[in-house]
Image: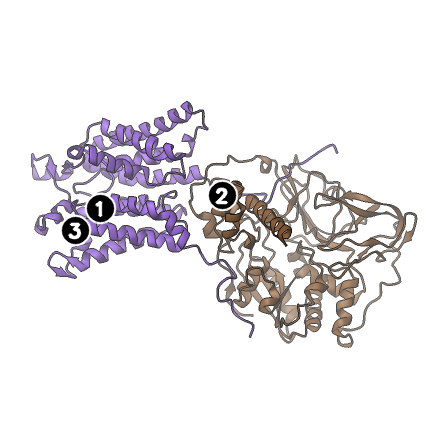
Chain colours: A purple, B brown
Amino acid sequence: MDNQYLVTSSPHFRSDYKIERMMLDVIIALLPALIAGTVFFGIRALMLTAISMVTAVLTEYVIEKLLHREITIDDYSAAVTGMLVAFNLPPTVSWWIPVVGSFFAISIVKMCFGGLGNNFVNPALAARVFLLASWPVQMTTWKIPEAVSAATAADAMTTATPLAVLKTGTITHLPSLWSMFIGNIGGTIGETSTLALLIGAAYLVYRGVINLKTPLSFIATVGIMTWIFGPDGMFTGPFLYHILGGGLILGAFYMATDYATSPVTPLGQIIMGIGCGIFTSVIRLWGGYPEGVSYAILLMNMVSPLIDRYTMPKVFGTKGAKKVA
Amino acid sequence: MSASILTFKGGVHPQYNKELTNRLPIEVMPAPSEAVIPLSQHIGAPCEPLVAVGDEVNMGQKIGEAKGFVSVPVHSSVSGKVKAIEPRLHSSGQFVNSIVIENDRLDTLDESVKPKEDLNNLEPDDIKEIIKEAGIVGMGGATFPTHVKLTPPKGKKVDTVIINGAECEPYLTCDHRLMVEHPTEIVYGLKAILKVLGVDKGIIAIEVNKPDAIEAVEKATDGVKGVEVVRLAAKYPQGGEKQLINAVTDREVPSGGLPADVGVVVDNVGTVYAIARALKEGMPLIDRVVTITGQAVNNPKNLLVRIGTTLNDVVEFCGGMKGNPGKLVTGGPMMGVTQYTLDIPVIKGTSGVVLLPEDAAISEKVRACTQCGKCVEVCPMNLMPLFISMYALNDDFEDAEKYHALDCIECGCCSYICPCKRPLVESIRQAKREITAKRKKEA
C-alpha cells in the first residue's frame, strides 16, 4: 500500500469553536466596563487592571514552567482572571494589591487544584475575599467618580457605595438611578457601570459563550427578595438600587457563569442563579456586610458539583414515553 | 403537508457543504473490470458462497446465501468468471471473505431477474420474501437486514412507517438526488412496506434544506392515500432514528428499546428505492447511489455504482484527487469510517466517499475540560458527555454506565461542539464497548 491515509474515530470534522476564542470573547465583553471604569475613576483604574492581568498571566506561566507542565496561558483564561480580579478592586488601592490578588487567584485557587477547569471556586472572587479579609481598609475605601467630584467641587476623596448607604437605611442620600445605571457612583473598578456590563453580556450571549439561565434567575431573585423585605415593611424594598448598586450585574453575568465552578445542567444553572440570589439578599439585608455577591457565588460554587448530580437531565427515552394509540 | 417544521431537542449545525453535489444528477458509473463482493455487507451472519472459483456467473445471480434469519444474500453485480474467493479488506477495517469476479462486460442478466407481480396481487409475506431475496439492507449506512425490520417482535403493533429523507450528514446528497429523480419509486417502495406491515400511515420526512426533493416527493404522493410528506428542520442528527421518530410522531423510543416499541418502523429512502426496483424490475441490490465528494476530489459526483467497484476506480472516475486528502471517509464525516486505503470495494452501506482536505488531518490541541456544558446542551439523547467521558478516560466504566453511556447514539455532536477539542464520543464509545463486553461475560 503506497499511500496511507489517517485513520481516526468519528466525527471527522469539528466546529471552529475554541476555548481560547471564548476567553478572548470574555475579554472583549469586559472592555466596555473597563472603559467606563477608566472614564469615571481615571487612568489609575486602567493601570491597576493591566498590572493585575500581567501578574495573573506571569504567575500561570512561571508555575507551569517550574512544574514542567504544558504552558496554557494561550487559552487566555489567566488574562480573564486577572481582569476580573482588578474589576473587583476599589480604584484607590495600592498597586501591589492587584499583584497579590492575581497571584493568589492563579497560584492558590487555580493551579493548586490542577489549572483551568479544575478549580472549585471562582479564582477572581476568592482573591477578592482574600484581599478583603487581609486589607479591609484598602478594600473598602471608595472614591467619588472624577466627573462627580469635579462638578460638585468637593474635595472629599472618599465616598460610600450605594449599598453601604442602603445599609444605614438613609435612602435619601442615594445617587440617582441614572447615575447608577451608567456607573457614575462609588464602587469597584468594573462593577459600577451596568450599561457597559450589559453591552458586554449581550455580546457574550450573541457569541454563545454564556446563556441567560443563571444571570437572570440570580438578578430576579435579588430583585424579588429585596423588594419583599423592605426597610419599611413588606413589599417596599428599593430593589432597583439593590440591582444596580453593587456587584450584582458583574457577578451575575461574568462570575456566576464561570464554566468550571457552575453547574452544566439547564436546571442546575437556574438553581445556581436562585441560590446566589438568596445568599446575596440575605447577606445584604440581614448580614454584617453591605455587599454579598462574592460570598454568595463562592458558596454556590462549592455546591455546584452536587447540583449537577441531582439535576441530571432525564435521558431520552426514560420519561413517560407516549404509548402507541 | 403540514406547514410546520418538525425537529428534536439538541443537535448541532455543522457546515453542510452539500452544494458540492446537490445539483448534480446521478451519473451511471461503468461497471468495473473486476468486482470484489464481500460475503458480509450487513449486520448479522456472513453469507455462504454459492459459487466456486472458475464458475461463470450472471449479473443479478445470487452468489452468497444468507445464513440465519438476521442475514441477507449477496448477488453478482457483473457477469463473468469467479477469479477468487478470498479474504479482502472491507470498509469495516477487517478482512472479509469476498468473491472476486472478472467482468466479461456482457452484463448477461440472470434468469431470476424478472419483474414481480403488481403489489395488489402479492401477499405481505411474498413481498417480505422478495425483499429478503433481493439482499436489501438499510442503505443509510447501518445495513441492518430490512426484512428483519419488517418483522416486528410479537405483541408490538406498528401503526406508522417513516421514510427517512433527512440526510442530515454533511456532504452527502445521494438520498437527496434519489428523491428528486426517483420519487415515484420511493413512494412505490413505501407502499410495499405498508402492505407488508398492514399499516395505513406512511410519512416521508425530508429536511427543509432540500426544497426540490420535497417538491418532487410531494408531487409523487399526490392522491396516494395515507402517505404524507413532512418537513424537518435542517439540523444534525435529524436523521438519527430516535430523533426522527421523536420529531415526526412526538414519541420517544424507550431507552434500550426499538422503534417498534412505539409503533414505528423507519426505512431510508435508498432502501425503499431498492425495494421498488426489486419489485418492478426484479433486480436485486447490486448497485447503489454513492456521493463522491469533499474538497480533495476533482469532480464531486453522485454516482450509481455497482457493488464491488473499488474506491480507487470510483475516485478515478471523479477526476482523481485534488491535492493530498487529509482523510478518506466512507459514509458521512460525522459518523462515517476513515479508511487508510482506497483499495476497498463499495458495499451496500457505502452512502458516500468523502475526501476531506489536507487540514482535516491536523489534530487540534486538546485542552483540559472547562465544564462549559456545551456537550450537555447539544446531546440529542440528553446525556452528560463530559462526565461519561471523564469516567471512561479513567477506566471507571461502572460510573460511565451510571451516567447512561449505553444510551449514547454516537452521533458525535459532543465532540463536534467541544471548544477544548476533547475526544468525547471517542471515549464514550470505548466505555460502551467495555460495558457490553462485561455484560456478555456476566451473562
Give the amino acid at mark 2. Met
Pick the quarter of the image with the C terminus of chain B: bottom right
Marks 2/1: CA distance? 34 Å
Amino acid at the residue labelled 1: Gly
Q: Where residue A148 appears, x then y in whole percent? A: 13, 40
Estimate the x, y position of residue A271 in percent, counting from the top left. 33, 54
Label 2 packing within 10 angstroms: few (<14), some (14-19), many (20+):
some
x and y percent of residue B221 in the render? 64, 70
Task: Check disc 3 and report the residue beneath it.
Answer: A286
| Callout in the foreground (1, 3) | 3
Type of residue at label 3?
Answer: Trp
* Residue drawn where x is 46% and y is 51% of the image: B376
User: Which one is nearer the viewer's eye here, B398 or A153?
Assistant: B398
Q: Which residue is mark 2?
A: B390
**SS class, disc 1:** loop
In the rendered image, residues at marks 1 and 3 fall on the same chain: yes
Residue A292, label in figure: 1
